[in-house]
Image: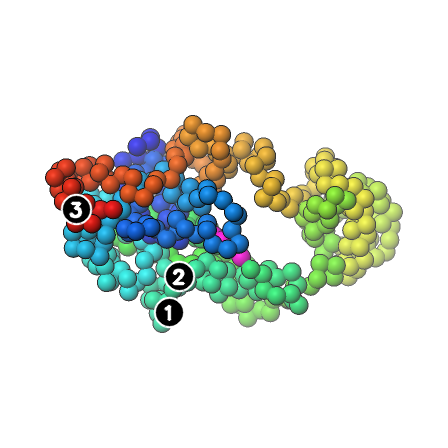
Amino acid sequence: MGQGIFDGLKVIDCASFIAAPAAATVLSDFGADVIKVEPPGEGDTYRNLYKMPGMPATELNYPWELASRNKRSLCLDLKSEDGLAVLRNLVGQADVFITNLPLPVRRRLKVTYEDLGPLNPRLIYGSFTAYGEVGDEAEKTGFDSTAYWARSGLMDLVRADADAAPARSVPGMGDHPSAMGLYGGIVTALYRRERTGLGGLVSSSLLANGLWANGFFVQAALAGLAVPPRPKREQGTNACTSIYRCADGRWFILTLLNEERQFLPLLQLIGRPELADDPRFATQAARRANAPALIAAFDAAFMAQPLAHWRAALDAAGITFGLIGTLDDIADDAQMRMAEALVPFAGEDALTISSPFLIDGETKTQPRRAPQLGQHNEDILREAGYSDTEIARLRQLGVLA
């Protein structure tokens, strides 16, 4: 496998849909050898998500390429005694085992931490669930749309305004951030193993990560405070931190926090310096009290020029703002490439999304295309000590597919 900080680390990805496998992907980015265990038939059901209604019409399995890059596929029937024996053998040689199988399924397949942990005292068992390991809802199934986005209050809070319907999430919106929580737990446990020699159980959940993501207002609620409902944009409470539309229909978000120093330069660049003398806007307190009127003035000004004009002007003035990007922008975003947030697949021009951090002095594995179902069956079993005769027997039994 490729070189990296985790070169030599053996990881078993016995998971699906999206957060737990994505944590394994991050480990692979830094050199870990990740074995993707999939059931016979169609394999990991995530392979077929791109075919669901509402997805782009394509034969390219783009989500699989992202979540399963760098990995090797082992198609193994864990419902059979022989298949389970293979997994137990691999676990005995592994450093990390990752799963998000529902807790009852784990017990039925005999792949709980209590089943696998004793096979390898150095094993880090990464467990991911929807609602946590204990409690009345521990065995309840869930996805990021339900356990992360809806349950945490995020769906309610980010609606356009108090009268709008709760805002729906997009696929993986909570899973990919949650993967970093599980990844962080695994790496912390690996650090502990360096000190003690022992592995252990690491757990994370969509529920916990959703609360963490919404921590600003959740903590306010825990302190007994009432969070004001979000007003309509035109009736906002701060014109200097609102979103504005340009002449070409593109939007940006203005984030002017140092009003004392930057309010007048902002007025000058939009061609409205006289607003500084308007008593409604002369002080920060006055601007808050008259925010809708200032929003209306900014609306008219920003609608006079296209986004490219305002990006150049705001950058020149040193005023913080954010382009409200579209998917069509991303492939041509030079900054994303220079920051190595977007990287090419090995030997290709096609791009993928890198894991969201860099380590000085460490080079990430250049992303390799995701495996076909069972592509690496023989290689993985030979490395684990199986003979060609034993591999042929397992194939004949249907344990390998």
Q: Is residue 171 magenta?
A: yes
Give the alpha-carbon distance from disc 3 to disc 2, as whole Å: 37 Å
Task: Provide the secondary structure element on which disc 3 rests.
Answer: helix
> Which residues, given as a range, are shown in magenta?
169-173
Which tag is nearer the camera, tag 3 or tag 1?
3
Q: Residues within 10 Å of mark 2 (few under 14, many from 20)?
A: many
- What's the residue type where badge 1 is placed? Glu
Residue 104 lies in quadrant: bottom left
According to the picture, the residue beneath numbered tag 3 turns out to be 396
Relative placement, left or right, of 122 versus 253 is: left
Residue 44 at x, y = what percent? Answer: 34, 51
Q: Residue furthest top?
A: 347
Q: Is residue 247 magenta?
A: no
Q: Amino acid at mark 2?
A: Ala
Q: Residues within 10 Å of mark 3 (few under 14, many from 20)?
A: few
Left or right, residue 306 beside residue 186: right
- Residue 320 location, x and y as percent? 67, 43
- Give the Cα distance between marks 1 and 2: 9 Å
Q: What residue is disc 2 on?
A: 130
Residue 229: x and y, percent? 64, 66
Magenta: main secondary structure: loop
